[in-house]
Image (cartoon, rainbow, N blue to C red):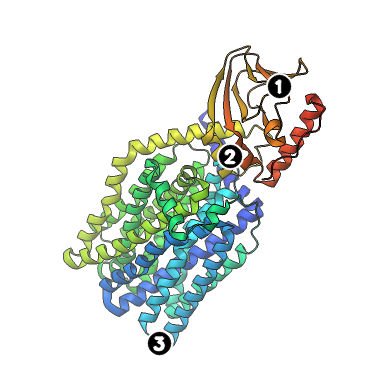
Amino acid sequence: MERARGTGRLAQAAAAFTSNWRNPNLRRAQLSFLGAWTAEWAFTVALGIVAYADGGALSVGLVGLLRMVPSAILAPLLSPFADRGRRERVLVVVSALRGAATGAAAVTVAVGGSTLVVYALAVLSTIAATLFRPAHSALLPTLCRSGHELTSANVVRGMLDSIATLVGPLLAAVLLVFADVSVVFAVAAAASLWAALLLLRVRYDAAPRSAATRGSGLIREAAEGIRAVAGRRDLQLILALAAAQSLTRGALTVFSVVVAVELLGTGEPGVGALMAAVGVGAVAGSLASSFLVGSRTLGGWFAVGVGLWGLPLALVGVFPHEAAALVLLAFIGVGNALIDVAGFTLIGRLAPDAVLARVFGVLESLVAVSIGAGALLASALVEWFGVEAALIAIGLLCPVLAVISWRRLRGLDRTVGDLDGAIQLLQRVPMLAPLPLPAIEQLARALETVEVPAGSAVITEGDIGDRFYVIQSGEADVLGDGRVVASLSVGEGFGEIALLRRTLRTATVRAKTALLLGALDAERFLLAVLGYTPSTEAALARVDDELDRYGPREPLDEPPAG
């Protein structure tokens, strides 16, 4: 039994990668993330070296804060652009802007220009990078059709993030052996531009956006994202823990330099080696996290990932040796992989699609502030108490918070599990099966439970139609012209003809046994089904088939406009 379960997990893990590769749009979106984040990590190493040469550890911390404050302010204000229309277009602009800013930094360093110019370009590049992840995170659910597939996509993106965490710093370390920092900046610029080119070829059926949403102001739209977080305690918990992890990440940008130069004495190449160790762990963690596909314990694994972001730093402060530091920092990479898969999947499942990019924008704002604060705090603690004490103090934050949050995160797992059950029920209805995950998840949240005793009519021929029904348990008979023309059972839906054709009920549906139904109001049903071409075609084909079997003979109106 255990062997069979393990084999099934392995098959699911392998399917996570192959399904992403077979989907051309998902493949391009994922590879663009690889290019963008390889650029980000190489850029971070190069900028840290420039800042350290300019003013030591305190300068590294101040530059980190300088990068993040504008991003924290602008991320929620700019993220509404990704909710207004096609998200891949936002990503193209962002990637191109990052490439241009990073390329300008390369030229500035190469000609011996002012470091202030480099810092200003770093701020511009970081603002663009801060907008990239919200738009990309909001794009992925649109390219998926189930929670399982979204988890798979986040597993693959987590793996690519881990590879970038390894390749970016390692590439920087190798380049620094043979060239100067300007070459690292130039390579990072090329990676950003490659990401933009990949995104130009992404094609998908975009969700309909209301005119009111497109016409409202940016500040009002940004406030809707904040309200979406404020109204959901589970989202607040995930974002708070992400902020704590990001504070530790900001501290790591300082620790990677001061630990290598001052504590271990390995010099500038040692900075890249330490960050590469994080990348090695992230790759290993991503391979392991692929077994989370199909898991119902994402909240618990998210807590483990948060804890692993801090505990290794505290242990480096206790065991300040190069070999120990490399091994311990690899566990930070493992934690990062777990957070990428579990955290982003949970946020994608908990937040409404209409404001999803804005919710991720709020997250990025918190991340930016926390990274800047963490870099500054680490610099100050190093100056006041020394490197070892600073490592221990900051390293204990995440493990403590993970322990405190454990029970609530496990409760969140149960909530998501119930939602998955409703989604699986809806996906058994042919016209709903083609819907992307955000659309069908919205329907699952809106399902109202209706109980009907045996022998009672659910809908009656000639009545006005205002709901669509799906059978959760029991059986029903369809009566047309006073005779039973069909029987319905679990997973089958009815009531769509009156909604799609704007006519009265064309048949009576009566409970053959006690029924437990899921009901959707007409507005939600029509918005979802008519909002996507495949579901519209499937719905209209089903209506034509049912009318041929038992519908009335008089002409019917055309379906309402989507």
Instruction: From the viewer's side, name the closer residue of 140 and 21.
Output: 140
Q: Which residue type carries mark 1?
A: Glu
408 to 35, vertically: above or below: above
The residue to which callout 2 is attached is 440
In the rendered structure, the answer to whether residue 476 lies left or right of residue 211 reads: right
Q: Which residue type carries mark 2?
A: Ile
507 to 91, vertically: above or below: above
The residue to which callout 1 is attached is 461
Q: Earlier in the sequence, mark 2 or mark 1?
A: 2
Q: Earlier in the sequence, mark 1 or mark 3?
A: 3
Q: Is residue 163 visible?
A: no
Give me the C-alpha separation between circle 2 and circle 1: 28 Å
Q: Are marks 2 and 1 in contact (CB under 8 Å)?
A: no
Q: Is residue 95 visible?
A: yes
Mark 3 neighbour class, 10 Å CA radius: few under 14, some 14 to 19, many 20 or more: few
In the rendered structure, the answer to whether residue 34 lies left or right of residue 398 reads: right
Which of discs 3 and 2 lies nearer the camera? The answer is 2
Q: For the residue labelled by badge 2, is the local secondary structure a helix, a strand or a loop?
A: helix
> In the rendering, at what x and y percent does residue 329 appear?
35, 57
483 to 64, vertically: above or below: above
Location of the C terminus (image quadrant): top right
> In the rendering, at what x and y percent does residue 152 appear?
55, 46
Q: Which residue type carries mark 3?
A: Gly
The residue to which callout 3 is attached is 112
Which residue lies at the image location 55% right of the left edge and 48% below the top edge?
A: 141
> In the rendering, at what x and y percent does residue 37 appear?
48, 63
543 to 326, vertically: above or below: above
Which of discs 2 and 1 lies nearer the camera? The answer is 1
